[in-house]
Image (cartoon, helix red, strand yellow):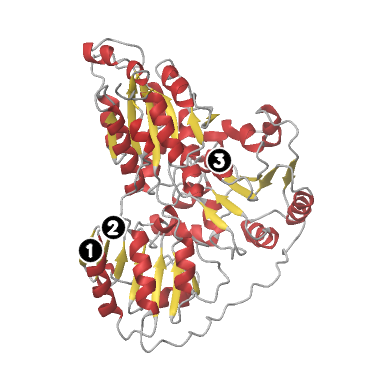
């Protein structure tokens, strides 16, 4: 008798593949076109459903989840109205190299083929509108058909992991429940590997380029986080003659008290002029996982030439402009470490760069208005090693850049896409990825009003949330027209929100002076096993110095 070929539904196949990639949480919202798909994906019980209040929040939560687990994440929406709500989140994941899998439950393949005038469609019989939209902000946009369904799913997932970009998987309702062969599941997906010949060619060219260099300076970018390469960076930092600066999007990638650290580099916005000169004048310079956008280069004021450097990308490497395709970032960093280790004669250790000690902060008036000049030094003193600090675009992120984070801390933000409201649901995703870490979210009032619907669910995970209430869009006011009506937001009673949104037992505080903040932070530290929601009342036009400089540049 011929062996029975085991089968599995398309939806269950996708669920199993996600599990094999280490995904344990599935974010999203139900809708009539994805209900059968969800039932199949969740049937095995290994994926935990995390419902969101809207599709934008689901996409942001998946993005934050992927960043913290250093691997792919997934969320599910329904066709049309659901998927379009998530496009902004998907675009942010694309801009910042985050491998998110957006699964969309589509109408049946029969309805699509017939051009039926269904609800949630544009009532024109064309079901390709939204797939085409998704194609603009993903590395792959696929509608799964009955024939070759498993292969289509596998190829899309491999694309997400290999490119560190989001992908779109549209699955018609009737296809979701079709049986297909389960045999491919016996072989977990193999992530793309570097081309061995290209790696050896790169190794020889790198050894020649670095030959005789007693000092090597590296600028480390956020793409290193996407590949979980923090340990490799620490190993490089231990090499004699190596110093490492980071971009703002990868701040604290190397502990900021490490002897090899140069601090954060951002062109003319670099706080320490020694950091700027060390990077701009470096020869040789290694760029690793760097992103050359305006906010990360000080409005393109960087003084180095990428075409004269070693430039390590996610899927290829360059040495003084010569490209080596098929050399992935994991492999190029490993080769760099080996080449540095093999140098002869071996360089002497570099002297540690002098660090100006930050004096203990004393507010000019402890009972005066709380300002950014007080907030960030007080937060600096209060943060504990290992904390995940999440900072919203605008005043919060640029205030966080002025901190020297304790060892083991991470800074999570979205400086490339810079979509306000991102961090609140992203914090939810991040904490589900690593619930053991103490987590602090700093977010402005205007930003929080976009995505605050997830507050109750987030507070179940015991974060500390610092809500900066500065009466509107301070970053926009710093750029232009501070008195314009469009800079205002409706004033909310923030301290009542946790109870209203499902977390009635959350301790709630309000700080209007430096003395208030010191007292509140002490209370929060004394009760680490509970969440805390703190409203910080700051002057409308007050902003961190680094943000003021950026606003001038944009203006």
In percent of width and height, residue 135 lies at 27, 35
Mark toward the viewer: 1 or 3: 1
Task: Kindly check if marks 1 and 3 are in contact, taking CB atoms under 8 A apart as contact.
Answer: no
Query: Image check: 527 left or right of 542?
Result: right
- Look at the picture and state if 519 lies above or below 545: above
Q: Which mark is residue 424?
A: 3
Give how far apart the Cα atoms at labels 2 and 3 are: 36 Å
Mark 1: few/some/many CA within 10 Å (<14, 14-19, 20+): some
Give how far apart the Cα atoms at labels 1 and 3 are: 42 Å
Residue 465 vs residue 548, the one in the foreground: 465
In percent of width and height, residue 8 lies at 38, 24
Give how far apart the Cα atoms at labels 2 and 1 are: 8 Å
Q: Residue at x 54, y 38 (%)?
A: 425
Query: Image check: 60 left or right of 372?
Result: left
Task: Kindly check if marks 2 and 1 are in contact, taking CB atoms under 8 A apart as contact.
Answer: yes
| Residue behind mark 2 | 194
Label 3: element kind:
helix
In percent of width and height, residue 39 lies at 47, 20
Q: Residue at x 34, y 62 (%)?
A: 331
Mark 2: few/some/many CA within 10 Å (<14, 14-19, 20+): some
Task: Kindly check if marks 2 and 3 are in contact, taking CB atoms under 8 A apart as contact.
Answer: no
Mark 3: few/some/many CA within 10 Å (<14, 14-19, 20+): many
| Residue behind mark 1 | 198
Residue 185 vs residue 249, the one in the foreground: 185
Label 1: element kind:
helix
In percent of width and height, residue 309 lies at 29, 71
Mark toward the viewer: 2 or 3: 2
């Amino acid at each position: 008798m011929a062996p029975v070929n085991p089968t599995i539904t398309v939806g269950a196949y996708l669920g199993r593949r996600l599990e094999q990639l280490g995904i344990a949480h599935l974010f999203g919202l139900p809708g009539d076109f994805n209900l059968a798909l969800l039932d199949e994906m969740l049937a095995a019980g290994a994926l935990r459903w995390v419902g969101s209040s809207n599709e934008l929040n689901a996409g942001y939560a998946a993005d934050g989840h992927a960043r913290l687990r250093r691997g792919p994440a997934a969320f599910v929406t329904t066709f049309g109205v659901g998927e379009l709500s998530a496009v902004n989140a998907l675009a942010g994941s694309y801009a910042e190299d985050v491998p998110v899998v957006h699964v969309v439950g589509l109408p049946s393949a029969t309805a699509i083929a017939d051009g039926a005038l269904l609800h949630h469609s544009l009532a024109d019989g064309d079901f390709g509108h939204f797939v085409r939209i998704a194609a603009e902000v993903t590395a792959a946009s696929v509608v799964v058909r009955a024939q070759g369904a498993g292969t289509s799913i596998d190829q899309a997932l491999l694309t997400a992991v290999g490119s560190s970009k989001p992908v779109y998987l549209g699955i018609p309702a009737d296809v979701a429940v079709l049986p297909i062969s389960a045999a491919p599941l016996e072989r977990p997906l193999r992530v793309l590997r570097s081309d061995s010949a290209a790696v050896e060619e790169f190794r020889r060219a790198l050894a020649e380029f670095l030959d005789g260099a007693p000092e090597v300076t590296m600028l480390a970018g956020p793409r290193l986080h996407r590949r979980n390469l923090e340990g490799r960076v620490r190993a490089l930092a231990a090499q004699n003659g190596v110093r490492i600066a980071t971009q703002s999007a990868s701040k604290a990638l190397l502990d900021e008290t490490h002897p090899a650290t140069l601090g954060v580099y951002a062109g003319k916005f670099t706080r320490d002029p020694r950091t700027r000169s060390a990077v701009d004048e470096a020869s040789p310079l290694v760029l690793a996982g760097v992103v050359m956008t305006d906010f990360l280069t000080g409005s393109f004021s960087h003084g180095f030439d990428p075409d004269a450097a070693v430039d390590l990308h996610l899927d290829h490497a360059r040495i003084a402009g010569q490209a080596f395709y098929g050399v992935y970032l994991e492999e190029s960093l490993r080769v760099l470490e080996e080449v540095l280790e093999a140098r002869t004669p071996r360089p002497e250790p570099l002297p540690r760069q002098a660090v100006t000690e930050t004096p203990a902060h004393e507010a000019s008036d402890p009972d005066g208005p709380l300002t950014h000049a007080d907030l960030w030094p007080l937060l600096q003193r209060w943060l504990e090693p290992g904390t995940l600090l999440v900072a919203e675009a605008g005043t919060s992120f640029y205030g966080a850049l002025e901190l020297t984070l304790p060892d083991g801390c991470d800074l999570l933000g979205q400086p490339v896409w810079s979509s306000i409201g991102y961090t609140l649901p992203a914090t939810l995703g991040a904490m589900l990825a690593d619930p053991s870490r103490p987590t602090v979210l700093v977010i402005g009032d205007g930003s929080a009003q976009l995505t605050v619907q997830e507050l109750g669910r987030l507070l179940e995970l015991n974060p500390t949330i610092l809500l900066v209430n500065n009466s509107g869009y301070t970053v926009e006011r710093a750029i232009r027209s501070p008195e314009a009506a469009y800079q205002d937001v409706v004033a909310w009673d923030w301290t009542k929100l946790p109870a209203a949104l499902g977390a009635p037992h959350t301790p709630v505080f309000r700080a209007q002076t430096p003395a208030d903040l010191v007292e509140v932070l002490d209370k929060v530290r004394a009760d680490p096993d509970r969440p805390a929601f703190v409203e910080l009342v700051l002057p409308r036009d007050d902003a961190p110095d680094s943000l003021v400089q950026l606003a001038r540049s944009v203006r």
